[in-house]
Image (spheres, helix red, strand yellow):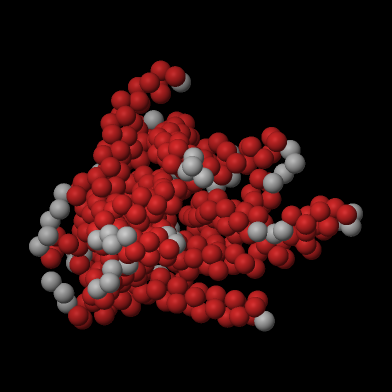
Amino acid sequence: MWDWDYAAEVTGILLKAIPNVLLATLGGFVLAAVLGLAFAALIRSRLTIVRNATKAFVHFIRSTPLLVQLFFLYYSLPMITPFSMTAFLTGVLGLGLHYSTYMSEVYRSGIDGVAKGQWEASTALNFSKRRTWFSVILPQAIPPVVPIMGNYLIVIFKETPTLSAITYIELLLRAKNEISVSYRVFEPYTITGVIFIVGSLLMSLAISRLQKRWMRKRAA
Amino acid sequence: MLETVLKWLPFLGQGALVTVKITLLSGVLAMALAMLSGLGRTSTFALVRLIAAGYIELFRAASLLVLLFWVYFALPIAGVELSKTWSAVLAIGLNIGAYGGEIVRSSIQAIPSGQYEASIALNLSPFRRLVQIVLPQAIVRMLPPMGNLWIEMLKSTSLVYFITMSDLTYEAMILRNNYYNDTPVIFGLLLLIYYALSSCISLPINWLERRMTAWR
């Protein structure tokens, strides 16, 4: 059932897919962080329409599967718009958009944590909207929630196999391709699973270390 | 256009039934595992705590789609052959159950220690303390995150498309083969159906949450 020689060979092949996985993970995470902040700000807009439209959009994205969103972006978007994207860009956009809705919640909790007096003081000092957000609110809102954001990096990492559905060559698709040549199923899938488990555990270890250092720095 | 959409509905309806079935079956497994592992982590026996923590950490670290592939394609090589349905239920149940375990644990640990001290002072047995004092308060705390977890579960059932199970996503992909030019409409409709199904989870949970926290 288990052939160590073959397992070693497959591990070598599979590890070559890691850069692709990390690229999609990072791209998705950065986009999610940026879009999430934009959504969090729009949800606090003064205009009721903007507020409600953003809320509805975020809720809709959160309530529907990433896989279907990827299909929509990859197969429908080129038919209704003049744009078509590579599997990688679609994957990053899909991951980023999907997890931005989770990220906006994280930002929201950070923004809600800023004392109301800070807003009032900014008004009293006649700060512009932009200055209020960028010099007063965000510098206080974001640091406390950075640790929570780190967890979404791991979530996005584990979600990258879904990108195989739109033909992005990540770990799972690599394993599938390998199986179609070797006709051996057990080793490639088992090793893929182990890589994800080890990867997530390593990432969470690294993140909790950073979190501790972060907390100490903030406390100092 | 409307006529075409009406022609699709029976297929999508059938797929939706499969999606709902898998959600409910994996839900039962996930909730059972969540309760067991969540309570296990607060156990006084070190071994029970270790097993529960091991389960939660392992399956939270795993990628669900890879787990599904492993259960469906690799396990038969090891002599365990499961049908598509049970493979899906096992993989989703194990994965979501681990997340649920964390919710149960944190809700139980959030109960103020005075509640435990009072139970001991009243000479309640550990079982009565759990069932009559701790759980009723913990469940109120669990409700919102568990509702979100159920929506995560519903969304994750779309992954059974990969093992060619005829769920909602799979049916839509087949429709797409026959009505290629309508691809955007099919996927748009698919998103709306998933949204409606999610609302079937979130609306009752919100209502229940309001009712159960009315005393606050």
Location of residue B144 with respect to B56 vertically, above or below: above
The residue that appears at 36% across and 36% down in the rendered structure is B172
Q: Quadrant of residue B74?
A: bottom left
Query: Quick one: quadrant of the N terminus of chain A?
Result: bottom left
**Which residue is most to the top?**
B3
Q: Quadrant of residue B11?
A: top left
* x and y, in percent, of residue A157 in the image: 45, 64
- Figure disc tally: 0
Q: Quadrant of residue B43?
A: bottom left
Q: Is residue A106 left or right of residue A67?
A: right
Location of residue A152 with respect to A1 vertically, above or below: above
The residue that appears at 67% across and 81% down in the rendered structure is A220
Location of residue B65 with respect to A81 vertically, above or below: below
* x and y, in percent, of residue B78 in the image: 13, 65
* x and y, in percent, of residue B173 in the image: 35, 39
Location of residue A146 with respect to A36 vertically, above or below: below
* Residue B41 visible in this rendered orientation of the protein: yes
